[in-house]
Image (cartoon, grey):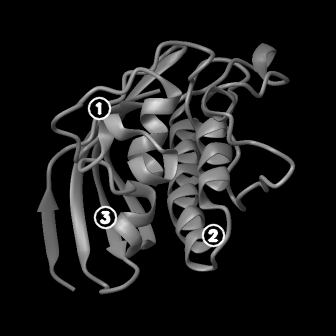
Amino acid sequence: APQKRISPAPMLFAMRPASKLPQRVGIARAVRVLSTSARPVPGVVGVAPRGDITSEDVVAAQAAWSNAITGITKVYQEGGDFVAAAGYCAGELYGYGHSNVLFKPTRATNNPFRPTGEDAMAYFVGAEAMKNDKFKGEDGGFAINGGQGWSEVVFRNHQIDCNGNTAIAMGDYLFTNATTGDVGRVEYTFGY
């Protein structure tokens, strides 16, 4: 399928220090979506380096994020609680509640920065699903691709620069539309 080019999506993924592993706060608690109905999404586990962040840690975080996006789509397509699934995934993969998160969603123009977990969730699952009028008309649910879903997300790192307890990765990733099979390409620079 032909590649479609869309704009870059800088954001910050969380890598929790091992000392903070038992604390599962973050985005899920911020938006109160985790409950007894929330189920872990296969392949989505936050990365917690035992020392300096390595390239392998970054690649593991990227794989977990890819699994999150396709896993949320699967839950959505099966008629499940995709909001709870997204809350679980975001709680595992983002640092809300642990540190500042610099998140600027790809397709957000009216409200381009999402400093809180609740704001980020509106982008991932849609303003209507979150009952958040502030983002209506802008947030259709990136994690479910506005209802079409994603069947695959592939990261292609150009370079990973590790600097102790932080790392920066630059490259592009490919999103395959689960309905049409079209592939979109996005460039990124991510901090970890």
**Disc 3 to disc 1, how far (Cα)?**
18 Å
Return the residue at label 2. Answer: 75
Percent x, y of residue 117: 52, 29
| Quadrant in the picture for the N terminus | bottom left
**Disc 1 to disc 2, how far (Cα)?**
25 Å
Q: Tag 2: residue type?
A: Val
Q: Which mark is residue 71?
A: none
Compare residues 136 and 82 and report the one nearer the observer: 136
Return the residue at label 3. Answer: 174
Disc 3 crowd rating (10 Å Cα; few below 14, some 14-19, many 20+) is some
Is residue 167 rendered to the left or right of residue 87?
left
Dot in front, 2 or 3: 2
Percent x, y of residue 68: 57, 56
Percent x, y of residue 123: 38, 44
Residue 110 occupies which quadrant of the picture? top left
Q: Tag 1: residue type?
A: Lys
Kindly state the secondary structure of the residue where label 1 is placed: loop
Residue 154 occupies which quadrant of the picture? bottom left
Compare residues 91 and 49 and report the one nearer the observer: 91
Percent x, y of residue 84: 67, 51
